[in-house]
Image: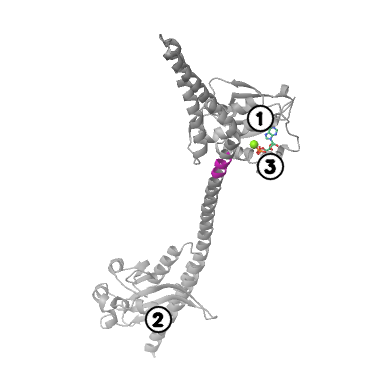
C-alpha cells in the first residue's frame, strides 16, 4: 500500500515538474525576442527542471555531410557537443536518434546508450559524460489542415537514467517541440518582414541607381548627338573660319616665294610672312581640334575648369555665325573668376547652345539692335564664390507664358528647331551642382545664365 503511494507520489512529482517546465517554456515562447535567445532559454529550462542533463537544439544544414549543427544548448556536456558529429543523411552518423527524427519527422529515442547499436558512433563520449538514455524530437508542428511547420531541426535531450523517456515524456516533449516550431516561425516572420523590407529598400536603391545610370548615359549620348547637330548647323560658318587662315597661309606663302625670287630677298618680310603662316596654321588647327573634341567625346571627364577658357574655346566656333548676322559682340570677363569642377566639353556645349540661341533670337530683329554681351562675374555667396556666365541678347525675347516651358525637352518655337538645347544644358549644369536660368531684359531680348560653385 505504502509502496503504491510512493509510486503515485513519484509520478505526481514528475508531473508537477513537467507542468512547471511547461509553464516556464510557455513564458519563454511568449517573451522571446530572438530565435537564438528562445532556443537557449528552452534548453536552460529543461535542464533546470532536473529530468535531463543536457539539452540542445540542432538545425539541418545542406552541406555535403548533411550536418545537424547545434545552435543552442544548456547543461552538462558542452565539450560533448563540440566534438559531436551528427547527420541527417543516410550515413552511419545519420542513424542516431537525431538523424532518424529529422528523416521521419517523429521522435526517436534510445533507452540504453550502452547497448543500442544506433548509438555506437557516440557511445564512448556519451557514457563518459554519464548519459544513459536520450531522445530527439523534430521541431515540427503538424497542423489540423494537414500542413506542417517544420524548422528542419531537433530538440535533443540526454538523461542520466536508462529509459528516462517514457510514452508520456515523449508526448510532452513532442508538444513542446511543436510550440517551439511555431514560436520560432512567428519570430522569423517578423525577422523576414524586416529583412524583406530591408532587401526591398536595397533593391529599390540598386534599381534606382541603375535607372539613373542609364538615364545619365542616355543624356550623355543625347548631348553628344545634339553637339554634333549643332556643329552640323555651324559647319558652313566653321568651314569659313578654317578657310580664312588657310587662304591667308596661301597668300603669305605666295608672297614669300615672290620675295625669295628677288636678287636680294627681303628677308624681314619673309620672316614676317612666315610668322603669320605659323599663327594661321595654329589657329586653323585649334578650331579643328575643338571640333574634334566636341564631335568625338561622349563620356564625361571632370576636372579643374576655368570658365574664361571655356568661353575662349567656344567663341571661334560661333564667331563666324555672329559676324555673318552682323551682330556686335561685347565681352565682359571679370578677372579672378573662381575655377570650377567640371567637364570642359559639356560646359562648352552649354555655352555654345546659349550663344546659338542668342544669335537665332536676333536673326529677325532690326540690324541696329543686334548686340550681345557675354559676361563672366563672381558672386560671393555664403558657401563661397560662384562663377556666373551670362549671355545677354537683344532678340525676340520670351513671354511670361513661355518662361516655364523653355527648358522642357522638345520645346521649340523655331521651324527647324529640335528643342533639346536648353533641356540638355540644364541637365549638364544640374549635374555640375549649378543652376541655369533665364530672365527677360528690361528693354529687348533675354539673358540666359548659369552659376557654378567655385572650387575651394
Ligand atoms: N535667347 C533666347 N531668346 C528668346 N527665346 C529663346 C532664347 N533661347 C531659347 N529660347 C526659346 O527656347 C526654345 C528652346 O530652346 P532650345 O532648347 O535651345 O531649342 P531650339 O533652339 O532647338 O529651339 C527656343 O525655341 C526659343 O523659343
Ligand atoms: Mg537651341
Q: Is residue 206 visible?
A: yes
Q: Magenta region's main secondary structure?
A: helix
Describe residue 340's horizontal placement relative to residue 265 as left or right. right
- Of residue 264 and residue 439, the one placed in the foreground of this image is 264
Report the residue at 52% width, 51% height from top.
Answer: 210
Residue 194 vs 364, above or below: the answer is below
Is tag 3's residue or tag 1's residue first in the polypeptide sequence?
Answer: 1
Q: CA distance from mark 3 to mark 1?
A: 18 Å
Describe residue 218's horizontal placement relative to residue 134 as left or right. right
Q: CA distance from mark 3 to mark 2?
A: 72 Å
At label 1, counting other C-alpha atoms closer than 10 Å, the crowd grade (few under 14, some 14-19, many 20 or more) is: many
Asked if residue 137 is among those painted magenta in the image, a careful observer would answer no
Residue position marked by numbered label 1 in the rendering:
359
**Residue 250, percent across and down?**
49, 22
Q: Secondary structure under badge 1?
A: helix
Is tag 2's residue or tag 1's residue first in the polypeptide sequence?
Answer: 2
Residue 10 is tagged as none
Residue 411 is tagged as 3
On the rendering, which quadrant does ligand 1 occupy? top right
Residue position marked by numbered label 2 in the rendering:
104
Q: Which residues are magenta?
A: 220-226
Amino acid at each position: 500500500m505504502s509502496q503504491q503511494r510512493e509510486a503515485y507520489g513519484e509520478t505526481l512529482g514528475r508531473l508537477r515538474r513537467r507542468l512547471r517546465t511547461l509553464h516556464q517554456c510557455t513564458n519563454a515562447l511568449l517573451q522571446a525576442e530572438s530565435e537564438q535567445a528562445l532556443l537557449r532559454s528552452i534548453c536552460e529550462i529543461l535542464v533546470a527542471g532536473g529530468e535531463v542533463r543536457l539539452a540542445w537544439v540542432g538545425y539541418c544544414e545542406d552541406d555535403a555531410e548533411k550536418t545537424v549543427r547545434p545552435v543552442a544548448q544548456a547543461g552538462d556536456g558542452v565539450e560533448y557537443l563540440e566534438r559531436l558529429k551528427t547527420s541527417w543523411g543516410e550515413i552511419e552518423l545519420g542513424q542516431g536518434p537525431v538523424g532518424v527524427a529529422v528523416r521521419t519527422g517523429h521522435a526517436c529515442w534510445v533507452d540504453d546508450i550502452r547497448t543500442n547499436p544506433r548509438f555506437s558512433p557516440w557511445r564512448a563520449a556519451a557514457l563518459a559524460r554519464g548519459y544513459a538514455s536520450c531522445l530527439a524530437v523534430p521541431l515540427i508542428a503538424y497542423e489540423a489542415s494537414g500542413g506542417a511547420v517544420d524548422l528542419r531541426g531537433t530538440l535533443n535531450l540526454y538523461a542520466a537514467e536508462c529509459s528516462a523517456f517514457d510514452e508520456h515524456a515523449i508526448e510532452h516533449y513532442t508538444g513542446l517541440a511543436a510550440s517551439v516550431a511555431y514560436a520560432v516561425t512567428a519570430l522569423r516572420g517578423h525577422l523576414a518582414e524586416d529583412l524583406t523590407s530591408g532587401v526591398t529598400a536595397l533593391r529599390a536603391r540598386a534599381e534606382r541607381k541603375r535607372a539613373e545610370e542609364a538615364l545619365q548615359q542616355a543624356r550623355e549620348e543625347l548631348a553628344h548627338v545634339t553637339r554634333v547637330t549643332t556643329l552640323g548647323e555651324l559647319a558652313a560658318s566653321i568651314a569659313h573660319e578654317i578657310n580664312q587662315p588657310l587662304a591667308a597661309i596661301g597668300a603669305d606663302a605666295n608672297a614669300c616665294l615672290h620675295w625669295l625670287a628677288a636678287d636680294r630677298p627681303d628677308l624681314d618680310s619673309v620672316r614676317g610672312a612666315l610668322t603669320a603662316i605659323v599663327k594661321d596654321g595654329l589657329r586653323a588647327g585649334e578650331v579643328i581640334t575643338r571640333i574634334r573634341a566636341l564631335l568625338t567625346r561622349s563620356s564625361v571627364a571632370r576636372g579643374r575648369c576655368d570658365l574664361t577658357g571655356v568661353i575662349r574655346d567656344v567663341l571661334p566656333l560661333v564667331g563666324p555665325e555672329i559676324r555673318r548676322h552682323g551682330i556686335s559682340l561685347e565681352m565682359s570677363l571679370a578677372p579672378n573668376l573662381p575655377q570650377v569642377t567640371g567637364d570642359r566639353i559639356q560646359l562648352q556645349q552649354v555655352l555654345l547652345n546659349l550663344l546659338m540661341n542668342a544669335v537665332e533670337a536676333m536673326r529677325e530683329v532690326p540690324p541696329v539692335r543686334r548686340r550681345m554681351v557675354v559676361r563672366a562675374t563672381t558672386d560671393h555667396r555664403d558657401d563661397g564664390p560662384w562663377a556666373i556666365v551670362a549671355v545677354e541678347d537683344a532678340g525676340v525675347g520670351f513671354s511670361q507664358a513661355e518662361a516655364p516651358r523653355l527648358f522642357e525637352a522638345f520645346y521649340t518655337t523655331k521651324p527647324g528647331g529640335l528643342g533639346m538645347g536648353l533641356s540638355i544644358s540644364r541637365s549638364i549644369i544640374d549635374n555640375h551642382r549649378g543652376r541655369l536660368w533665364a530672365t527677360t531684359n528690361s528693354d529687348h531680348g533675354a539673358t540666359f545664365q548659369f552659376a557654378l560653385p567655385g572650387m575651394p
